[in-house]
Amino acid sequence: MNKTILIGMSTLALTIGACAKRTPPPADVTPPPVTETNPNSTDPNSLEVVELPALQADLVAKAGSDTVYFGTDEYSLDQATQTTLAAQARWMMANPNVRASIEGHCDERGTREYNQALGERRANAVRDYLLSQGVPASRLVTTSWGKERPVATGSNEEAWAQNRRAVTVIIR
Amino acid sequence: MRLILTALLATLASTASAQDEPLPELVGGSVRTSTAIAVPVMPGDVIGRQVAEVIASDLRSTGMFTPLGPSGLPSYSVEEAGNPAYPSWRNAGVAALVSGYIEPRPDGRITLACYLHDVTAGRELVHQGFAVTGSDWRRAAHKCADLVYSRLSGQQPYLDTRVVYVAETGPKNNRQKRVAIMDSDGSNHRYLTIGRNTVVTPRFSPRGDRLVYVSYIGRKPRVLLYDVASGQERLLIPGDHITFAPRFSPDGRDVVYSMAENGNTDIYVVSASGGSPRRLTATPGADTSPSYSPDGRRIVFESDRSGNQQLYMMDADGSGQRRISFGGGRYASPSWSPTGNLIAFTKIAGPFRIGVMSPSGGGEKILTDGWQDEGPSWAPNGQFVMFHRTPQGAGAARLYAVPIEGGSARLMPTPVGGSDPSWSPLNN
């Protein structure tokens, strides 16, 4: 069940590199006193996941998009969404050595914890569809970012529509 | 001014019984009676001015007082602290006086002696001494302010507390979020996480020595247990599940939280020392934001099992689940007050507003009027609720505290943007 890759120090360095590339730290942040992580058996670092940017780009090129969108407070998949997901499933079948993290997101008009639940519903709906297209369950994990990672920063319908989404993130 | 304090004292006796009666309806924007109270420099030590400044600032933050000083007020001697010249303070136009002194102790610590006087009546109302290490003088000042607040309001103290929250920096589409802790007046601010992982919803243990919070590790939200003194932390719920919305039980032994699986979110409870979780809800829908009653017997939570977010009550073992919110709009993120008589919540009716209602669902009262006010957390005396306010557009969220009996929301002094506040219990 637990397909999470346990990684050593060298891989951890790669993880940080990948994260840094994707989300550079804001310039106005000064390094705070560090009091994080301990090396005991419940070390959170053992759960890190590695993204694969080149394969991510290939998915977008071949499947048309790595992202599908949802209505307000909804998690149903319309026809256009299903077409995109079918193409994603074909790409997954053609690249049998990778896994995908299906990541649900919400707009800012829900409360934080409800949105964490709603994002999981969206991710799960996408996962179910990919499974129906033949992608093995062992290659899919789901998560929810709630409203933590908006792509559009406005507080208007256009921005909210862009943020109500599920992204298929290719991971090792 | 004299009348004000007299009236205030006269109403003290009725304050306790008034709590059981229906609360007044509208609050946001109304202004409380404000008592003029002098806080001159305390004699005995060079920190006497800073001590008075902290006390004055604390008293101002309650919304009940208009502190004067320490600047511009006359000085007095150690001997006069308990026996002030009432006529001259009367002439200064104040109704009350906070006096005191600081003296070294044989054990190397210091004592802050704190006196509260009714200037109008010309008598002392209360005094107490607080012994602290020299570097902890702010704690003694907060204790003195709490003594004054308590004596004049009839409420339990709450000023000597801390706040843990999520410090937010960077643009909205690339926010860095770190757990931060500070005294409730903004001093002694420090970051507890480095910001590599997104974090949300830190919450104090009932004794204030531990936190639970959610960190995105391996791209999933997971519940971490954090020891404040040592900085040690560990995953509370092993495995690969999406877990969030953690809160301690009132005895600190358990943590209640949500787990999402296959499109369904339910509430579970696990021992804070580890072990197997127990499932409390099993209804299809998103069951989340659980919060215990102060006696630990019941849990209030939100669920969309009826079609949209509403508040529900259940016994701590999951039995007897029933809906309690029936007003218009959606209700979210409930938080049970430490005094047990109220539940704070986020009401979603277009904008998000903070409100309170009784545990039976009656007596709803809306406290705030922001665009998005969310995530209430109670002061330990049950008289104030802290929350975060998000502006429209790309601006930063900030923390505010609002009195439940009426008055405007006060901006909390955080050095950067902030969300998800948790108010600590009263410091020891």
Image (tube, rainbow, N blue to C red):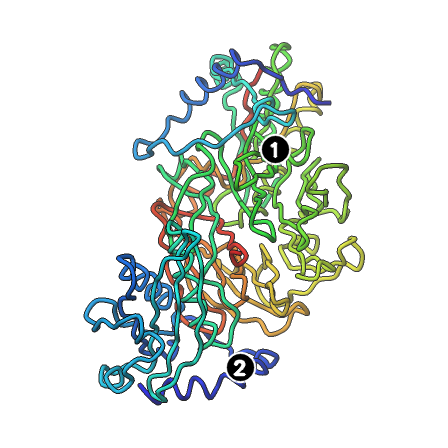
Q: Is residue B218 visible?
A: no
Q: Nearer the viewer, residue A67 or A109?
A: A109
Q: Position of residue A29 (x, y in %)?
A: 33, 34
Identify which residue is drawn at 76% across, 48% down: B280
The CA span between labels 2 and 1 is 44 Å
Q: Answer left or right for B47 relative to B305.
A: left
Q: Position of residue A162 (x, y in %)?
A: 46, 37
- To the question of a shared chain for discs 2 and 1, the answer is yes
Q: Place residue B9 in its image quadrant.
A: bottom left
Q: Position of residue B161 (x, y in %)?
A: 47, 57
Element assignment for label 2: helix
Q: Amino acid at mark 2?
A: Thr
Q: Which mark is residue B234?
A: 1
Q: Sort mark 2 into few (<14), some (14-19) or many (20+) by Cα contacts within 10 Å.
A: some
Residue pointed to by mark 2 = B15
Element assignment for label 1: strand
Q: Sort mark 1 into few (<14), some (14-19) or many (20+) by Cα contacts within 10 Å.
A: many
